[in-house]
Amino acid sequence: VTSTLEPAELREYNPFADAVMADPHRFYRVLRDNDPVHYVAELDAYAISRFEDVWTVLETGENTFVGSEGTLPPKDVFLHHNDGPVPDPPLSPLLNHAYYSSPIYDDVRRSYSKLMRPRAAADMADMIRRLANERLDVLLPQGEFDLTIDYGGIVSASVVCELMGLPMSDAEAVLTTVNGASLAKKGVGVSTAAAHGDYFSHLLPIVERRRAEGANGDVPTVDGLINFELQTPDGPRPLTDREVATNLLGIFIGGTETVPKVTAHGLWELLDHPAQLAAVRDGLADGTAATAREEIIRYCAPAQWFVRTVRKPVRIGADDYARDVRPGQRVIALIASANRDEREYDDPFEFRWNRPIERMLAFGRGQHFCAGFHVARLEIQILIEEWLKRVPSYEIVADEAVRLPSSFQWGWNHIPVRVG
Ligand code: HEM
């Protein structure tokens, strides 16, 4: 990555600009050095790029920063500028919980999270290992395949099916739906709302089925939401099927699309650093995959940014560059930039499998911290372990690898691999 931009070109920084979507890191470096709390006038938003500032903003509580316009709004939402704080959306129909402040956000999230808590997640290890090996049984005899989609993609979509009570045979269809819907449109960004129809064709039947079966807790993710009571000014009420499905979207999308890109890119980085690959491979029995996983996540996590709308007047940034931000303005927390901040990580553009990592923002922080954190880390670790155990040599067809421009998930959509 080269820092070829002049500070003057910063005024062109906009997360939806074609050049930014195609290669964001060169912009981030200039932002970090020259204007860490950068105002994007068109969007009435401040893009924050330094680790320390993202860390502080995301951990700030008391509904100072809220998701009331969505945490990943498409451009048209930004184009409307607010005169003051943006209240939570109405409770009827209930949108995805990410739009609401505490306590509604927290209550809904708690209701579906049982299987993703540390111990429950750890109990999935055997299943994930079996899934990884089943994939390798199919793929290795083929000789060449897509490391992103065919390996981690199918495994992570299968885990989502398990969490949702869907048959694992649906994994391929789930993966296709999520990957298709999360592609960014030129100049507009990603609109998950536009893909709701596709998502709901998977999710609504599960909700209807679990309700008919009594939602007795056997599928905790879905049943937790079916049995949830929403506190409204008119008293408590249950969620409709559509509201339940809407609140499953985070797991459906988040659980499917990130792990495969991170894993495949990580295996590519290891291959590009033969001494590191050898060290990880040789030490598998001593847990090297778990160590490498952390650097792989820091280096390869594809999510670029998440948005908060400011609800209370707040000052952002260190004294020498702080900005006062008004209620109704937005903050774009550039977590991908934070992961490569020279102030937090020594030589951040270097991949080092055993880099000491004290703090990381790849999974966010604070209220919206990734609900799938434990499951995701387990999946990545196991996918790497099983790959290195069973694949003595591999080669990436770099010319044919695809990383599509995106305002959201800028990661390797396709990585063709040949196994020896
Ligand atoms: C390496 C893999 C993953 C990474 C890097 C990642 C990253 C993130 C980040 C940064 C957020 C915070 C969004 C925000 O601040 O607004 C988040 C939220 C979330 N993630 Fe993940 N994620 C990963 C895998 C998963 C998996 C496997 C699942 C489910 C099985 C999952 C489910 C969720 C959910 C439900 C949320 C909550 C959304 C919200 O509260 O707004 N993620 N993830």
Image: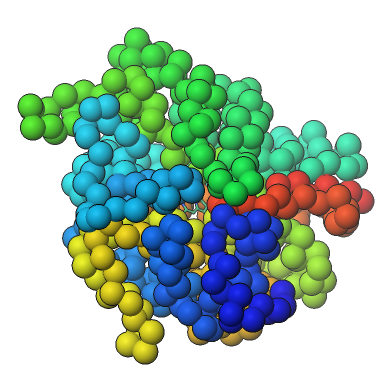
Q: Residue furthest top?
A: 212
Residue 199 lies, in percent from the top left, at 51, 27
Choose top left, top right, bottom left or bottom right for residue 23: bottom right
Closer to us: 2 or 186: 186
Residue 379 seen in the current view:
no
Q: Residue at x 64, y 34 (%)?
A: 180
Q: Residue at x 61, y 75 (%)?
A: 9
Q: How is the image coloured?
A: rainbow
Q: Residue at x 53, y 84 (%)?
A: 33
Q: Residue furthest bottom?
A: 320
Along the horizontal axis of the image, is 254 left or right of 210?
A: right
> Please, is residue 63 above or below residue 234 in the view?
below
Choose top left, top right, bottom left or bottom right for residue 309: bottom left
Along the horizontal axis of the image, is 345 left or right of 147?
A: left
Residue 315 lies, in percent from the top left, at 27, 75
> Please, is residue 259 above or below residue 327 in the view?
above
